[in-house]
Amino acid sequence: MDGSRWFGAAALTGALGFTAYVLGGLVTAWLAEPLPEAGERAPAFAAAGLDGRPVRLSDHRGQAVLLDFWTTTCVGCIGSLNRLARFQSDYGDRGFQVLSLNQDPTDLKSEVRAVVKERGLTFPVAIGPESHAAAEAYRIRGFPT
């Protein structure tokens, strides 16, 4: 191998090694955060709803609650909304509640509203900084979750 190829290979190896080191540190730090124990309360949140009313987990104490974290650019997220709407319709009268926490930037509220209207969603949908803070509290790292 000539000198320039050797240097290029060494630089690439070094860059990949550094990237793995940084990502490994982030994953290790993330995994080091304590997970909730069985029986612990879920992290509370209150976020602004698309309809202007607050979306609060505490309003649903005693119910089975499914939290849905999603974005309008996630195909899997959009695909799951119809199933969630069906679950809400089928089980809502038996103590089941979907709470939807959109993770799009607040300036995309019109796009979120369009998805909600198009899908005929009747469960609460939150958007904005409080919705993003809830995703952090629940350690959400990808969508849909």
Image: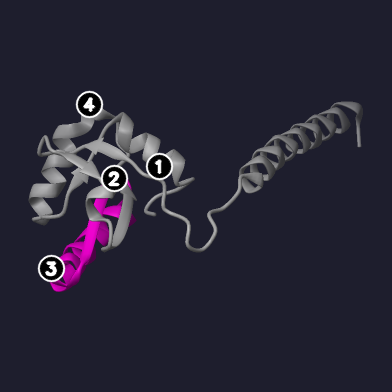
Residue placed at 32% from the left, 48% from the top? 70
Q: Earlier in the sequence, mark 1 or mark 2?
A: 2
The circle on residue 115 is none
**What x and y, as percent, mark residue 90?**
15, 73
Disc 1 and disc 2 in contact, CB within 8 angstroms: yes
Q: CA distance from mark 4 to mark 2?
A: 15 Å
Magenta span: chief secondary structure: helix
Magenta span of residues? 72-100
The circle on residue 135 is 1
Look at the image and say whether residue 107 sits in the magenta stretch.
Answer: no
Write down the residue under mark 4.
107
Q: Nearer the viewer, residue 114 or 44?
A: 44
Residue placed at 42% from the left, 54% from the top? 41
Q: Nearer the viewer, mark 4 or mark 3?
A: 3
Write down the residue under mark 3.
89
- Circle 3: residue type: Ser
Residue placed at 32% from the left, 29% from the top? 129
Q: CA distance from mark 1 to mark 2?
A: 8 Å
Q: CA distance from mark 3 to mark 2?
A: 18 Å
**What x and y, as percent, mark residue 108?**
22, 31
